[in-house]
Image (tube, rainbow, N blue to C red):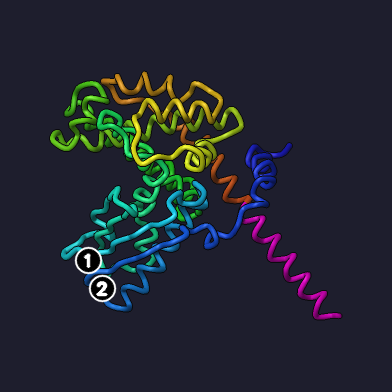
């Protein structure tokens, strides 16, 4: 009997055959501005940024903005590759990255921050009571992108998700109240971990339900980013549109529940394992497809050489 992973890979190969290379998906017009970096540091950072964009687009499809500006600034005394970053909803939209300019390429690639910030670009900026959706989506995607791009393993993915959810749970008693109320006041309260990881739990539950129906969250977001993405929206408008795209009531029913939650949601290890299995199968299918394409090209070249 074939394993579940083998069956999933076989099913995934059909839609993967039309997937373009990572580089061809990147934003139509990308501008990267640097401040305080040497030429050698710029070379490293530019390689990392292009790799990061490719990883996010491999998971979520083409970045939905025609123009994207990335501002890179050196952060003195940094103790990690990217200690601080944010998305600025200007025209054009901008991602600010404050970095340790001396970090190595692998250290940048292993840092989740760029994947988090780029994931924000696929949803509109929501009303403050629904910021848990904005930050929850980016938080959920940061490790999923790394798993899908094979930057981290399934074991590492599970460990990082479980650790993050535990941090959210541990800080919830310090920031009591309904999630939508805490989200609207999270800057003053310092309730970031509760808000971010409650939102990540929401999208984990959504994704598991969609996978069970033969779809997944990334497919729904891809369709949304192509048809319906706006600069600003409300959380309720967003989840209604996502329900319409997914032909379900999954997003709205969970939204109504989560927005009023006073506790931290429980996400089982089994849920995370199902999610990681699904996206790891896609990654393996992509690897198989690339190997097949390479062999085909080599065979075609050999035939040409023999003529």
- Say left or right for 152 vs 42: right
The local secondary structure at tag 2 comes to: loop
* 304 inside magenta stretch: yes
Is there any visible trace of residue 168 in the rendered image?
A: yes
Q: Is residue 275 visible?
A: no
Query: Pointer 1: what residue?
Result: 74
Residue 111: % across, % down: 35, 56
Picture disc at residue 37: 2
- Using the image as rendered, state which of residue 268 and residue 148 is in the foreground: 148
Q: Quadrant of residue 190?
A: top left
* Residue 30 picture location, percent across and down: 41, 62
235, above or below 118, in the image = above
**In the image shown, does 11 or 256 lie closer to the viewer?**
256
> Dots 1 and 2: beta carbons under 8 Å?
yes
Residue 5: image x %, image y %?
A: 63, 41
- Cα separation, mark 1 vs mark 2, equals 7 Å
- Highlighted range, magenta: 286-307
Q: Residue placed at 31% from the left, 23% from the top?
A: 259
Residue at the image point whose x is 26% and y is 25% from the top: 180
Q: Which mark is residue 62?
A: none
Q: Quadrant of the C terminus?
A: bottom right
Whether residue 152 is in magenta: the answer is no
């Amino acid at each position: 009997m074939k394993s579940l992973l083998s069956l999933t890979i076989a099913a995934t190969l059909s839609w993967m055959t039309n997937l373009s290379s990572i580089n061809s998906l990147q934003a139509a017009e990308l501008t990267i501005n640097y401040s305080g970096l040497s030429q050698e540091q710029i070379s490293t950072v530019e390689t990392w940024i292009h790799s990061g964009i490719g990883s996010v687009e491999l998971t979520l499809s083409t970045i939905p903005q025609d123009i994207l500006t990335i501002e890179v600034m050196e952060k003195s005394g940094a103790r990690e590759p990217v200690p601080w970053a944010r998305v600025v909803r200007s025209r054009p939209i901008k991602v600010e990255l404050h970095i340790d300019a001396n970090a190595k390429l692998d250290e940048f690639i292993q840092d989740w921050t760029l994947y988090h910030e780029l994931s924000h670009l696929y949803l509109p900026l929501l009303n403050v009571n629904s910021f848990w959706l904005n930050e929850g989506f980016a938080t959920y995607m940061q490790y999923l992108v790394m798993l899908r791009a094979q930057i981290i393993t399934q074991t590492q993915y599970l460990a990082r998700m479980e650790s993050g959810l535990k941090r959210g749970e541990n800080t919830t008693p310090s920031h009591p109240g309904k999630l939508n109320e805490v989200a609207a006041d999270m800057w003053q309260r310092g309730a970031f971990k509760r808000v971010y990881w409650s939102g990540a739990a929401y999208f984990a539950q959504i994704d598991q339900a969609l996978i069970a129906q033969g779809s997944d969250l990334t497919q729904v977001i891809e369709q949304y980013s192509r048809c319906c993405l706006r600069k600003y929206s409300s959380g309720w408008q967003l989840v209604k549109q996502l329900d319409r795209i997914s032909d379900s009531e999954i997003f709205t029913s969970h939204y109504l529940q989560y927005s009023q939650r006073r506790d931290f949601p429980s996400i089982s290890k089994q849920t995370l394992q199902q999610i990681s299995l699904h996206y790891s199968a896609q990654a393996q299918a992509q690897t198989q497809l690339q190997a097949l394409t390479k062999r085909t090209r080599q065979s075609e070249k050999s035939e040409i050489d023999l003529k």
